[in-house]
Amino acid sequence: MSTDPTRFVLVQTSHPGNVGSVARAMKVMGFSDLVLVAPRFADVLVQEETIAMASGAADILARARVVETLEQALDGVSFACATAMTPRDFGPPTQAPRALFQALAGSPHRVGLVFGSERYGMSNEDVYRCHAVLSIPTHPAYGSLNLAQAVQLVAYDWRQALGGFEVAPRTADVRLADVPAVQGALRHWEDTLADIGFLDPAAPRKLMPRLNQLLNRAQLTQEEVHILRGIARAVQKRGGSAK
């Protein structure tokens, strides 16, 4: 049996692109178990549009299964969550994903997340087979989500409840300038400001201490100190007093 703690179930999906997009949404959150119940096109998993929209998640499609009924799709699942917006007279309790997932994350359940068709959502009979109904909190005036969007939001909240992933750094660690480097830049700017008449050395007031505090708050990197000194040199050169 797969070690993936979750099964994503799509019921009577109409559009191949949505199936591919769902596979992509699953993969970026680290899930892989996808089951389709009676999709509109029997060959949807291998259609060109499906694979194109999967955008690198073709392995999810390759492992996915197509079955005839929701009961078959939930084989091995001990807690099934329906996603449905339409109010019903009775049925499983409705909860926001984040609240329900906090309780489910520490349980021994194998969770199934069930999504209905793009046009009709889930039938009452299918909702009644589930233990809970998930309702994604949206603006009350407009709650329409694309199928893949709904899967992405639910998959994200479930992954966060399971522990989430570390954020990978995208930029190199910066090297902050030390105090002497900042003071050197300040002295350079003090000379430059005097050269252009902005600073009167005989009556400097508190200009340089204020600039000192500004640069300290900025936490300059070494590269930024070099930029500031380069600007000062350019100003001095244009004024005929380059140093």
Image (cartoon, helix red, strand yellow):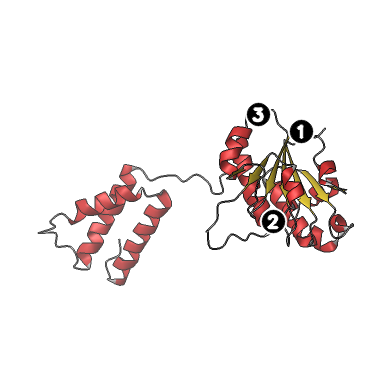
* Residue 22, horizontal then vertical, whole percent: 73, 53
In the rendered view of the protein, which quadrant contains the N terminus? top right
What residue type is disc 2 on?
A: Ala
Whether label 3 touches label 1, CB < 8 Å: no
Residue drawn 73% across and 60% down? 118
Tell which tag, 1 or 2, sits nearer the viewer.
2
Would residue 161 be found to the left or right of residue 77 on screen? Answer: left
199 vs 184: above or below: below
How packed is label 3: few (under 14 Cα within 10 Å), some, or many (20 or more)?
few
* Residue 88, horizontal then vertical, whole percent: 65, 51
**Mark earlier in primary sequence (3, 1):** 1
77 vs 46: above or below: above
Q: Nearer the viewer, residue 46 or 91?
A: 91
- Name the residue beneath numbered marker 3: 107
What residue type is disc 3 on?
A: Ser
**Mark earlier in primary sequence (1, 2):** 1
Give the CA distance from mark 1 to mark 2. Answer: 23 Å
The secondary structure type at the circle numbered 2 is helix
**Mark earlier in primary sequence (2, 3):** 3
- Name the residue beneath numbered marker 2: 148
Residue drawn 40% across and 45% down? 176
Whether label 1 touches label 2, CB < 8 Å: no
- Name the residue beneath numbered marker 1: 3
How packed is label 1: few (under 14 Cα within 10 Å), some, or many (20 or more)?
few
Disc number for residue 106? none
In the rendered view of the protein, which quadrant contains the C terminus? bottom left
Instruction: Return the residue found at the far left.
Output: 202
Would residue 140 be found to the left or right of residue 230 on screen? Answer: right
Residue drawn 25% across and 49% down? 213
